[in-house]
Image: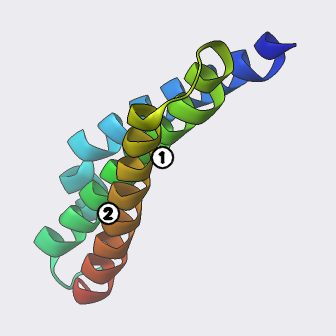
Amino acid sequence: MRMILAIPAAVVAAATVVAGMWAWQQAQDLVLDYGAAGRPDIEAWAIRSAAVAAIALAQVILLTLVVGRFYRRGVFDAVLALTSVIVFALATAGAVACGLAGR
């Protein structure tokens, strides 16, 4: 029963990490191809901040849905998950702020 949720969660987390790394690397090209003509450097940082948020979300998925299914959860796991949630929230706020400032 543990494997039913853990395997799709691991696949989703891995795909999210790959998408985040791709977005980080292709941020400047994405801005030049699809971005507004405002401030392309700030828009690129908005994409990079969103990529960091996606990777932090993938870490939360891995910690809660995959690792938490097979091992006993302790204080260290809770601190790591909380730190990842905080990074996700800050990176999302930074992506929204940079996206608005880049217009």
| The label number, if any, that marks residue 91 in the structure image | 2
Dot label at residue 57: 1
Q: How is the image coloured?
A: rainbow
Bin the neighbour count of mark 1 within 10 Å (Cα to Cα): few under 14, some 14-19, many 20 and up: many
Judge whether residue 66 can be spotted in this image.
yes
Report helix, strand or loop for mark 1.
helix
Rendered position, 89 above or below 54 = below
Q: Please state the horizontal and vertical placement of residue 79, each as a whole percent of the image.
A: 38, 44
Residue name at image x 68 percent, y 20 percent: 69
* Figure check: 4 above or below 100: above
Q: Quadrant of the C terminus?
A: bottom left
Q: Residue at x 44, y 37 (%)?
A: 75
Quarter where residue 59 is shown: top left
Vertical relation: 103 (above or below) 11: below
Quadrant of the rendered image containing residue 102: bottom left
Toward the viewer: 51 or 59? 59
The secondary element bearing badge 2 is classed as helix
Residue type at numbered disc 1: Leu
- The residue closer to the viewer here, 32 or 48, is 48
Taking the view exactly as shown, the residue that stands out farthest to the left is 41
* Residue at figure coordinates x 79%, y 15% from the top left: 2
